Image: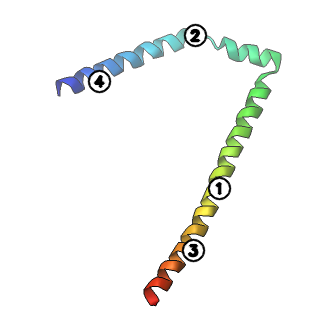
Amino acid sequence: MKTKLILFFCSMLTFFSSTAQTMNAEPAMADTFRSDGKIYVVIAVLSIIFICIISYLVYLDIKLKKIERTSKRTIDYTYRG
């Protein structure tokens, strides 16, 4: 119980210190990207990565459904015979 309490306080201390640092910080890198027009490149790359991940997940889902159908048929044939 004592270790859980110490862990809780340490995590809260870390959370509050990180929040305090971000409140005063200005997003200088984002402003630089916006002024140079490179933010669009960043958005394009992130969009491509996101689309690829979604496409891969859909592809896996289709393959798994196909495998499940064939496995279910195999199990049905096994029990009938």
Q: Are marks 4 and 2 in contact (CB under 8 Å)?
A: no
Asked if 60 appears above or below 15 in the picture, the reply is below
Q: Which residue is mark 3?
A: 70
Three-letter code for the amino acid on which mark 1 is drawn: Val
Front residue of 70/45: it is: 70
The relative height of residue 76 versus residue 11 in the rendered view (above or below) is below
User: Which type of secondary structure does the marked residue at label 2 adopt?
Assistant: loop
Label 4 Cα crowd, 10 Å radius (few <14 / some 14-19 / many 20+): few
Residue situated in front as seen by the camera: 18 or 42: 42
N-term mark: 3 or 2: 2
Q: Nearer the viewer, mark 4 or mark 3?
A: 3
Residue at horizontal 54%, vertical 9%?
A: 24
Quarter of the image containing the N terminus?
A: top left
The amino acid type, in three-letter code, at marker 3 is Thr
Rounded to the nearest angstrom, the CA distance separating label 4 from label 3 is 50 Å
Mark-to-mark CA distance, 2 and 1? 40 Å
Q: Amino acid at mark 2?
A: Ala
Among numbered discs 2 and 1, the one appearing first in the sequence? 2
What residue is shown with label 2?
25
Q: Secondary structure at mark 4?
A: helix
Q: CA distance from mark 1 to mark 4?
A: 40 Å
Identify residue for label 4. 8
- Looking at the image, residue 62 sits to the left or right of residue 22; the answer is right
Q: List the residue tagged with mark 1.
A: 58
Q: Are marks 1 and 4 in contact (CB under 8 Å)?
A: no
